[in-house]
Image (tube, rainbow, N blue to C red):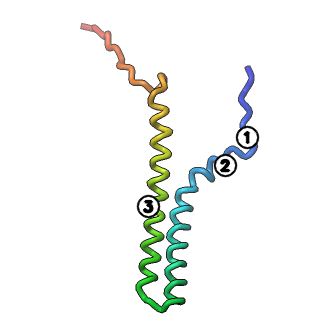
């Protein structure tokens, strides 16, 4: 029996894939806030800071939506596999 060789950094790559969504949320909000601060300093218009925060939150929500669509696509592919099909148990326990 030959075992399938796992990549040397398999666990690190798996962890990075799972934490990517959280990191992208934080980065999107931080970039939006930084953009708002920068625009406020350049133009002097006070409402550009909240607008930048809203842009960052919007980008974070969009990242969550894209991750949801990707996960749903992967799960829809799995649902057609025979090993995940529901098979009702046959209860033939006639102990009476």
Looking at the image, tell me whether mark 2 or mark 3 is earlier in sequence order. Answer: 2
Name the residue nearer the viewer: 42 or 84.
42
Q: Which of marks 2 and 3 is in front?
A: 3
Q: Mark 1 points at which residue?
A: 7
User: In which quadrant is the N terminus drawn?
Assistant: top right
Q: Which mark is residue 59?
A: none
Secondary structure under badge 1? loop
Residue 52 to residue 25: above or below: below
Q: Mark 2 points at which residue?
A: 13
User: Residue 34: x, y in percent?
Assistant: 54, 78
Q: Of all residues shown, which one is farthest toward the front?
A: 43
The reply to whether dot 2 and dot 1 touch (C-beta < 8 Å) is yes
Residue at (54, 84) in percent of width and height? 38
Q: In which quarter of the image is residue 72?
A: top left
Residue at (49, 58) in percent of width and height? 63
Q: How far apart are marks 2 and 1 (CA)?
A: 9 Å
Q: How far apart are marks 2 and 3 (CA)?
A: 24 Å
User: Residue 16: x, y in percent?
Assistant: 63, 53
Classify mark 3: residues with Cα within 10 Å, few (<14), some (14-19) or many (20+): some
Looking at the image, tell me whether mark 2 or mark 1 is earlier in sequence order. Answer: 1
Residue 56 to residue 67: above or below: below
The reply to whether dot 2 and dot 3 touch (C-beta < 8 Å) is no
Name the residue nearer the viewer: 80 or 38.
38
State left or right for residue 7 relative to residue 36: right
Looking at the image, tell me whether mark 1 or mark 3 is earlier in sequence order. Answer: 1
Residue at (55, 61) in percent of width and height? 24
Residue 70 to residue 6: above or below: below
Q: Mark 3 points at which residue?
A: 61
């Amino acid at each position: 029996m030959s075992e399938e060789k796992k990549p040397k950094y398999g666990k690190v790559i798996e962890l990075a894939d799972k934490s990517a969504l959280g990191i992208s949320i934080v980065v999107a909000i931080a970039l939006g806030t930084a953009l708002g601060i920068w625009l406020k300093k350049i133009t002097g218009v006070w409402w550009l800071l909240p607008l930048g925060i809203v842009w960052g939150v919007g980008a974070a929500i969009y990242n969550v939506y894209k991750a949801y669509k990707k996960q749903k696509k992967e799960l829809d592919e799995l649902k057609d596999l025979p090993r995940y099909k529901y098979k009702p148990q046959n209860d033939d326990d006639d102990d009476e």
